[in-house]
Image: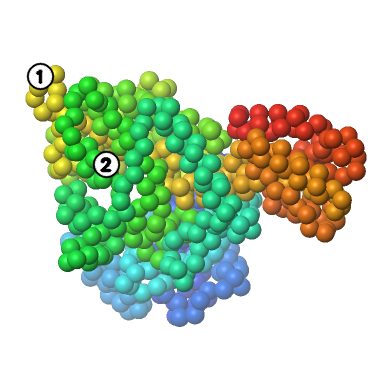
């Protein structure tokens, strides 16, 4: 039984209330905070002196089933604000009291009751607890009250709910598979990267194998950009505070920037963005309309402050390398440039075997235009160009009103991995603000200065987030072209070592990434280890292979491929690399 997205949200929100009721029954001293529905589930925050255990989650689930069986009506009613304050004050529910006090203009508030449990909530909810069918509590995490690290740390219980057991079981199986693919676990097991609290939270250490993966991606990225008429640039990691004041980042983005560094009495800041640097390069000479468009790309490392509570492996970090580019153009070139960027986005995603992606068009809120810079004319120009470019590319998209940045509309691309999970991917942003703030121009055919249009775009996002996504997408089993070790040569005995090294040299001569396992271990053990390390090919050499001047090949996915001549195998693997199989 499938239900609408809205009905699913109502079901999960109602389940969060049932969970809160069960917690209050089992742990009367607990204070409840908030408990919304979220994507794929729900949560509720609790103030409890002792941490919840896995055993506690089992007890809470059991009590929730009792509440469902009781089939308690869930009834909402409007209550005078002062009456609600008195009710929650008497119950000692300080978090509810705070929420109500933050609504000074409200004469009434909405309360929902189910049995003895009353909650402050706008609703809506299912008619009764008996309408809730299948649910599962998943885990406990810390969460600051109202997301502010200056507030008390609460305990957040996450759960999920579905209309049927089949849907719940399917989701739990997907979660189990996702846990197996977790980039933090695989990154450690496959020796790709590490994180070190003693070196600073949110900073990624790329190990040699991770370094190779990153090099392959970066080389591919650079080569493709050069083919498409981009130029490569490099910019500093810090700049004077003055630059960030001109760009507006110091005013609009300060909470995400690190504190100034004093250098000879002048304040410098670690860069959170690359764009002001590219604009400074643009300003070094007079630009003609004939010079445009300019496409400048940079793999630039930036630094942004993230609260420690939201840091997560390589997905949320404090220092990361962004595959950035800024395009400067005449207004009449905007649509064609957007078409080119969209084509590059699709090519890149498909090269990494992402076949499904959703496009969203983020535009301004038409009822609050004063929150955005620029005239109606330039916003309409940019939005029309974005829509036309997507139409020309045959792309369906969702329009997201009110989601645009203050300086221009954008295309946001959400890619889907092998498990069907969405990942934040490429972004294409049209910007009128920075060309204005930095007063950049080009000389038009009329010999007068004109303001260029600027596009910010990433086609991968950050290198850290993108590689984390690839680890989970491929389950650590990278295709041959990306694998840090493409083949491992396994000599059966010591006397076969020299031949193994000859084979290794032949592979290296055609730029294959190979290594020889010369340890005094049994062949079966070496093969199993290579499988665990997810190496695409294992090359076994012994007496027979030496006599015939051949190699025995074993594939990670296909098993034993038999004995073949060296040129035959080289042709096979080179083709796979070229075709990115």
| Place of residue 444 in the rendered image (x, y in percent of width and height, measured from the top left) | 14, 23
| Disc 2: CA contacts within 10 A as few (<14), some (14-19) or many (>=20) | some
Mark 1 or mark 2, which has the lower sequence index? Answer: 2
- Give how far apart the Cα atoms at labels 1 and 2 are: 26 Å
Please tell me in which quadrant of the rendered image residue 341 appears: top left
| Residue lying at 75% horizontally and 52% vertically, measured from the top left | 517
Horizontal side of residue 267 vs 517, given as left or right: left
Scheme of colours in the image: rainbow
When the figure is inspected, residue 21 is found, relative to residue 535, above or below; the finding is: below
In the depicted view, which residue is nearer to us: 69 or 406?
Answer: 406
| Residue lying at 21% horizontally and 56% vertically, measured from the top left | 240
| Place of residue 382 in the rendered image (x, y in percent of width and height, measured from the top left) | 24, 30
Where disc 1 sits, the SS reads loop
Where is mark 1, residue-wise?
A: 446
| Residue lying at 38% horizontally and 20% vertically, measured from the top left | 392
Horizontal side of residue 225 vs 548, given as left or right: left
Please tell me in which quadrant of the rendered image residue 563 appears: top right
């Amino acid at each position: 039984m499938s239900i609408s997205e809205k009905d699913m949200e109502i079901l999960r929100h109602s389940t969060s209330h049932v969970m809160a009721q069960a917690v209050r029954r089992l742990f009367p001293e607990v204070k409840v905070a908030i408990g919304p529905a979220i994507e794929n589930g729900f949560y509720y925050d609790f103030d409890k002196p002792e941490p919840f255990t896995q055993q506690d989650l089992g007890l809470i689930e059991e009590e929730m089933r009792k509440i469902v069986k009781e089939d308690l009506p869930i009834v909402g009613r409007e209550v005078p604000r002062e009456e609600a304050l008195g009710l929650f004050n008497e119950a000692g529910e300080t978090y509810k009291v705070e929420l109500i006090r933050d609504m000074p203009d409200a004469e009434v508030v909405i309360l929902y009751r189910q049995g003895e449990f009353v909650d402050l909530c706008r609703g809506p909810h299912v008619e009764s607890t008996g309408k809730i069918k299948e649910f599962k509590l998943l885990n406990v995490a810390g969460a600051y009250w109202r997301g502010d690290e200056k507030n008390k740390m609460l305990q957040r219980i996450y759960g999920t709910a579905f209309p049927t057991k089949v849907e719940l079981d399917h989701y739990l199986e997907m979660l189990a598979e996702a846990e197996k693919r977790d980039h933090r676990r695989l990154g450690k097991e496959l020796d790709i990267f590490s994180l070190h609290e003693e070196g600073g939270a949110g900073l990624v250490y790329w190990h040699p194998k991770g370094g190779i993966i990153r090099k392959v991606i970066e080389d591919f990225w650079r080569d493709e950009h050069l083919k498409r008429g981009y130029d490569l640039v490099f910019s500093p990691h810090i700049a004077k505070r003055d630059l960030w004041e001109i760009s507006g980042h110091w005013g609009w983005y300060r909470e995400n920037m690190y504190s100034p560094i004093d250098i000879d009495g002048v304040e410098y800041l670690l860069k959170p963005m690359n764009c002001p640097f590219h604009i400074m390069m643009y300003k070094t000479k007079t630009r003609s309309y004939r010079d445009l468009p300019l496409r400048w790309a940079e793999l630039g490392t930036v630094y942004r402050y993230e609260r420690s509570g939201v840091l997560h492996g390589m997905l949320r970090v404090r220092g990361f390398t962004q595959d950035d580019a800024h395009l400067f153009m005449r207004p009449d070139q905007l649509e064609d440039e957007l078409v080119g960027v969209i084509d590059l986005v699709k090519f890149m995603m498909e090269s990494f075997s992402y076949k499904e992606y959703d496009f969203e068009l983020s535009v301004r809120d038409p009822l609050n235009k004063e929150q955005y810079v620029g005239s109606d004319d330039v916003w309409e120009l940019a939005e029309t160009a974005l829509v036309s470019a997507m139409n020309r590319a045959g792309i369906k998209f969702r329009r997201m009103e009110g989601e645009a940045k203050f300086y221009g509309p954008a295309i946001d691309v959400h890619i889907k991995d092998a498990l069907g999970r969405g990942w934040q991917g490429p972004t294409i942003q049209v910007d009128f603000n920075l060309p204005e703030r930095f007063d950049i121009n080009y000389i038009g055919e009329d010999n007068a200065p004109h303001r260029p249009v600027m596009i910010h775009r990433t086609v991968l996002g950050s290198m850290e987030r993108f590689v984390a996504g690839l680890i989970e997408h491929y389950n650590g089993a990278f295709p041959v072209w990306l694998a840090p070790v493409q083949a491992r040569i396994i000599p059966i005995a010591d006397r076969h070592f020299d031949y193994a090294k000859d084979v290794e040299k032949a592979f290296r001569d055609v730029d294959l990434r190979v290594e020889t396992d010369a340890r005094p271990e049994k062949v079966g053990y070496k093969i199993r280890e290579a499988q665990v390390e997810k190496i695409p090919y294992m090359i076994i050499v012994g007496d027979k292979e030496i006599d015939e001047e051949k190699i025995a090949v074993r594939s990670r996915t296909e098993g034993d491929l038999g004995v073949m001549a060296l040129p035959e195998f080289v042709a096979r693997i080179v083709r796979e690399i070229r075709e990115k199989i």
